[in-house]
Amino acid sequence: MQKHTPSHPKASQRFSKVLRRLVLPVLAAFSLQVVAPALAQVSQVPSIGDDARTALTPIQEYKLGRYIMVQIEQDPAYVKDDVLNEYLFTLGNRLIAADPTIRGELVNDFTFFGVKDRTLNAFALPGGFIGVHTGLILATETESELASVLSHEIGHVSQRHIARMIASSQNDIMIPIASAALGLLVAAAGGGTDAALGTLLAGQGVAIQKQINFTREAEKEADRVGYQILKHAGFDVNDMAGFFAKMQHSNRLYNDAPSQYLRTHPLTSDRIADVQARAMHEPYRQHVDSADFQLIRAKARVVQGDMGGGLYEVERYFAEQVKNGTRYQIAAGYYGLALVALERKQPDLAQQRLDVARKMFSETVNRQSSPLNVLAVQIAIQKGNAADAVRITHNAIDHFPSSKAMSNLHIEALAKAKRYDECQRFIRKMTRRYPEDAGLRKKSAEVYAGMGKIGASHLAMGEYYHLMQMNEAAVEQLKIARSEKDTTFYEHSLIDAYERAWKEEIKEEKKNK
């Protein structure tokens, strides 16, 4: 999807922040050993459909994507809200389940996550990591529109466009990377964002022009694959072309972008026409939005609420929605008003508004809602009712056993209730399910600290830093854990094994730098 630069006095400041947020991780990522040998082996541009193994293997793609994700997860724009990310994960995997062959050579599961940004954009990283802007979620009017965006990005991953772009770039890929680094140095030295932007574009113009035709072909291919994904999953394919047209109109509103080169997903009239032509030959199929779709749009509006008008404007929007919306929208409006009250530390008011939302939801849909249950737990925790929070999460997990949002709240509720042993057992269970979730290690460290097990706490923090790719900090935590008197024999064995492995990783990092 296209990314737009709105006409705003602070646009240049935001662009500078974007450079620091996204370009630096890419610079670091391309210095990794998994990428450098691959670039050296590239000799020609692959044709559409070629296997991209000569550029980047699926395992290398995943390592590169995971490296970038670690950087993104530390950025304030990364949405840490479990409810929103869980919905994106569920919707994305529903699309994938409709045709498992689209996974192609991917060696890991897809990951879907939100980014707090008003622009209409979504993007795919190497290895199946797909980000969606909150602004895009709010711009969609139907679930099929949102699904069409995700299916397009899944198409990019399925066809391994990133690996093929690296193959097509060969040495030229180093030109925009080097110019981006120089642009950052210019800005840091006081040259200003205009000078930095000029430096960046001068280098990009040489290399990206050579790839623009391939990029357009990649977009069309992602459209074709995405269309089939959308169709097989039972969504309304007409909404794909409709949303593309909406994005094209949005692009006209923001036509002062500094360069076409900064628009990573060129959206053209022939792409829209191609999707429309395909849809004309399909029998009409109305897709009923899931009950949670409107709730998630309300959640996205609150997540984005500290940008622009703040919570006051968000609350006014929900009040208007309650007055004039459909039944689903009214329920979502009360849910949004409850979220606003929770943000303002007004748990009693949040509970009143949630009760109305739950009543309307249950009258419309005869099933429980994960977002509504999560909010009930958050209200109980804010009120200081840890026992109630544990009870709600325990019951809700029976209805939503795969809900990561509910599982994380169960851990928080058990810790608040000082049921530490039970909490650690549940964390270990979740860690087996999500072995790369650094946050679980951090929670484990906090719980061990509450139990007075200082050695175990530092060991868990070491695991956290290692997963965050901060190996020197991780080794330092191991040293502290080793020095603590309450560290057990088993924990000492783990410390020794971790230390050997992580020091080797540090050596490799220094060698590659």
Image (tube, rainbow, N blue to C red):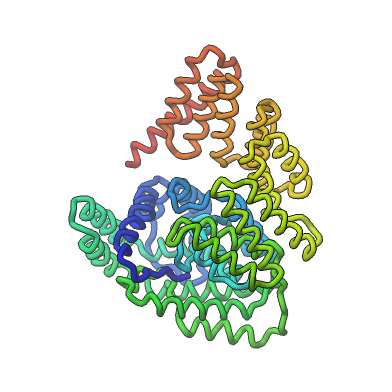
Q: Position of residue 235 (x, y in %)?
A: 68, 73
> Looking at the rendering, in which quadrant would you find the C terminus?
top left
Question: Between residues 395 and 349, which one lies in front from this camera angle?
Answer: 349
The residue at the point 36 percent across, 48 percent down is: 28
Q: Position of residue 462 (x, y in %)?
A: 49, 29
Q: Is residue 19 left or right of residue 347?
A: left
The residue at the point 54 percent across, 29 percent down is: 460
Res. 432 visible in picture: no
Question: Between residues 241 and 450, which one lies in front from this camera angle?
Answer: 450
Count of marks overlaid on the render: 0
The residue at the point 23 percent across, 55 percent down is: 187
Question: Between residues 9 and 98, which one lies in front from this camera angle?
Answer: 9
Residue that extends furthest to the top in the rendered view of this protein: 485
Q: Position of residue 158 (x, y in %)?
A: 56, 64
Q: Is residue 260 left or right of residue 82?
A: left
The residue at the point 65 percent across, 45 percent down is: 379
292 over 406 or under it: above or below: below
Name which quarter of the figure residue 40 lies in: bottom left
211 over 511 or under it: above or below: below
Question: Between residues 447 and 463, which one lies in front from this camera angle?
Answer: 447
Q: Position of residue 368 (x, y in %)?
A: 76, 55
Res. 334 visible in picture: yes
278 over 383 or under it: above or below: below
